[in-house]
Image (tube, rainbow, N blue to C red):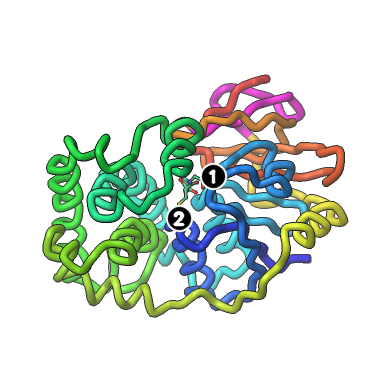
Amino acid sequence: MTTPILHHYEFSTFSEKIRTALGYKQLAWKSVDIPGLPPRPLLTPLTGGYRRAPVLQIGADIYCDTHAILSALERLKPTPSLFPSDTEGLARGLGFAWERQMWVPTIGVLVHFIGEHIPPEFIKDRKEGYLGIDISKNAMAPQFQEHVQFVRGQIAWLAQAVTTHKYVLGDQLSAADLACWQTIFLLRKNCPPEVDTLLNLGPIVPWYDRIAALGHGTSTAMTPEEAFEIAKTSKPQPVTHITASANSEGIAVGSKVSVTPEDNARVPVVGTLVASDAFNIVIHRHDDVAGDLHVHFPRLGYTLVAA
Ligand SMILES: N[C@@H](CCC(=O)N[C@@H](CS)C(=O)NCC(=O)O)C(=O)O
C-alpha cells in the first residue's frame, strides 16, 4: 500500500505546505482529518509520541516533520522535483531557516488580528504542550512591532528574489518556496486584507498566487481507523535511501535511542536505530496493537541520543 496517507487538519499551515507539495506533484493521497490539538488516539501509537502536524504514513512507515515528508514524496514521485538541479542544499537550508525564524513572529502578527477568536483551550495547549509560550493576543501584544519589523525584513529579501526570477532559487519551484509560502499563507488566509499593506506583501503576490494555484492533488477521505489498520497490516519498507549508516554521535544501528525535536513539542520518541545519515533518522518501534513501524525524522532539528 504505497498511497500516501496524510494525517493533518485544515488550519494547520505546515499541513498546507504538504498539501501543496502533493498538488505540485499531482499525487493521489488519502486524507485523515485529525483534531487541532491532542488527544489523537490513533495517531500517537503510530508516531510513538511525536505530536506535531502533519504526519505522513505510507503503510507502516511514518514520516514526522514536513522536511522528512517532502523527501519521502520526492522519492515516491521524483518529477516534478522539489529540489530541481543544483538547489537541494539551498532549498533544504533556507526552508529550515525561514520556518525556524518566522514561526513565532508570524503567530505574533496573526494573533494581533484574530487572537480574540482563539479558544482558551487552544492557547493553553500551545503553551503547555507545544510552543512553551503564551500566544494569547494580550501576551504577544508587547512584541507586535518587533514581530512586524522582523517579518517585513524577511519579506523584503523574498520580494527581491521572486521578482528577479519566478521562484526563490530560480525559475523553477523548490522546497524553499513551499517553506516561505506556508507562513505567509497562514496570515493571508486568516487576517484582513490590510495585512498585505502592513507587511509589504504586494510585490510577492504574483509568486504567492502561482503557488496557491498548484492545488492539493487528488485526495480521498480516510478514517483514522482505516489508516491504523493499514499500518497494522503492513510491514515497514527496507531503508534504501540511507546507504552508509553513520551519525556523528557514534550510535550503532540496533541501539535503543530517542529522537526529540529541539525547538518545541519536545516529546522523545523511543525506538531502535535502523539507519541515520546527515539528513535522516529512521527508528523501529513495536506498538502492541499497530505492530512493527519505521518512524522517520529529519536529522536537522532533532536530537538523537542513546536511550
Ligand atoms: N518542524 C515541523 C513543524 C510542524 C508544526 O509546528 N506544526 C504545527 C501545526 S501547523 C503543530 O504541530 N502544532 C501543534 C499541533 O498541531 O499539535 C514541521 O516542519 O513539520
Residue at screen point 69% across, 48% down: 43
Q: At which x and y percent is residue 69?
A: 56, 55
Q: At which x and y percent is residue 302?
A: 51, 34
Tell me where residue 213 sits by quadrant. Answer: bottom left
Q: Judge the density around disc 2: few (<14), some (14-19), many (≥20) Cα neighbours within 10 Å.
A: many
Report the side of 183 relative to 229 (left or right): left
Residue at screen point 41% across, 51% down: 92
Q: Judge the density around disc 1: few (<14), some (14-19), many (≥20) Cα neighbours within 10 Å.
A: many
- Residue of label 2: 14
Q: Is mark 1 within 8 Å of ligand 1?
A: yes
Residue 194 visible within the image: yes
- Residue of label 1: 52
Residue at screen point 27% across, 35% down: 139
Q: Gap between marks 1 and 2, in whole Å? A: 9 Å
Residue at screen point 39% across, 62% down: 178
Is the residue under label 2 in contact with that under label 1 (CB below 8 Å)? yes
Q: Is residue 120 above or below residue 163?
A: above
Q: Residue lying at the far top in this picture: please name it.
A: 307
Pick the front one: 157 or 80: 157
Q: At which x and y percent is residue 137?
A: 27, 43
Question: Closer to the N terminus: mark 1 or mark 2?
Answer: 2
Specify start and end residues of the magenta stretch as a single range: 246-261
Q: Is mark 2 within 8 Å of ligand 1?
A: yes
Q: Is residue 150 above or below residue 248?
A: below
The C terminus, quarter of image: top right
Q: Secondary structure at mark 1?
A: loop
Q: Secondary structure at mark 2?
A: helix
Inspect the magenta stretch and tell me whether residue 66 lies in it: no
Q: What is the magenta segment's predominant secondary structure? A: loop
Res. 163 mark: none
Residue type at the position of mark 1:
Arg
